[in-house]
Amino acid sequence: MGKGNAKAVKASVAYKALIRISAIYDLEGALKELTPEERLKERQSSIRPLVEEYFAWIKDVFKQGLVLPKSETAKGLAYSINQEEYLKVFLTDGEVPIDDSASEQALRNFTIGRKNWVTINTVRGAEASAIIYSITETARANGLNVYYYIKYLLEQLVTLIDEQGNIEQSKLEPLMPWSKNLPDDCYSKRRR
């Protein structure tokens, strides 16, 4: 990209919006280890002013006619204004995430898997798929390495089966994805 193009990009409304949003996300990223109460207090003092300034700036951009009404930038900024109330919810509760990326990421696997599930032609097959999906997503949500966790589960489950082919419910609790007694290799590198 030439120097002229780089200057044009940096002068663009879209670039300026991204810079403002990045500043908000940078501050929020520094709060992830805080308790919800501490996070809310920090959000109120450091992030709320940036969020308020962002929305005031967007409204001013439209007022001054700095974007073409049907441009992609205008559509994105209009979406922000239309969703302002909902985009600010994280400022009122320290437990509410800044966005729904985690939810979207969890649903993404389901959406991708949906194409594979058209080959399931029995109720038992659908139930088995749902169980596997539930186990893997719960393992991911608990910061586990899914491969090693499933491997561990399979190794342990065969040792818990009684003569009738049943497993006592109480023996399953130590195997749950939220159990603190799982082997170290079950945990993702991020949590070690």
Image: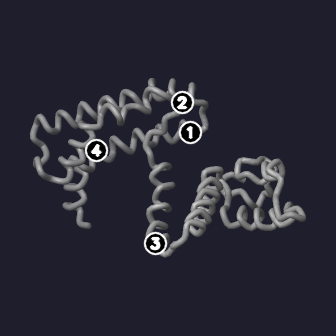
> In percent of the image, x 53 and y 39: which residue is there?
30
Q: Note whether 93 is above or below 76 in the view shown.
A: above
Residue at label 1?
A: 32
Residue at label 2?
A: 39
Q: Marks 2 and 1: in contact by CB < 8 Å?
A: yes
Query: In the image, is 164 to the left or to the right of 175?
Result: right
Helix, strand or loop at mark 3: helix
Mark 3: amino acid:
Val
Mark 2 → mark 3, Cα distance in angstroms: 44 Å
Sequence-wise, the earlier of marks 1 and 2 is 1
In the rendering, which numbered label is found on residue 118? Answer: 3
- Where does residue 53 sit, x and y in percent of width and height? 30, 31
Q: Residues within 10 Å of mark 3 (few under 14, many from 20)?
A: few
Sequence-wise, the earlier of marks 3 and 4 is 4
> In percent of the image, x 21 and y 61: which residue is there?
5
Q: Marks 1 and 3: in contact by CB < 8 Å?
A: no
Sequence-wise, the earlier of marks 3 and 1 is 1
Judge depth for marks 2 and 4 and give the one in front.
2
In the rendering, which numbered label is found on residue 17? Answer: 4
Query: In the image, is 189 to the left or to the right of 110?
Result: right
The image quadrant where one finds the N terminus is bottom left
Pick the front one: 68 or 182:
182
Mark 3 → mark 4, Cα distance in angstroms: 42 Å
Mark 4: amino acid:
Ala
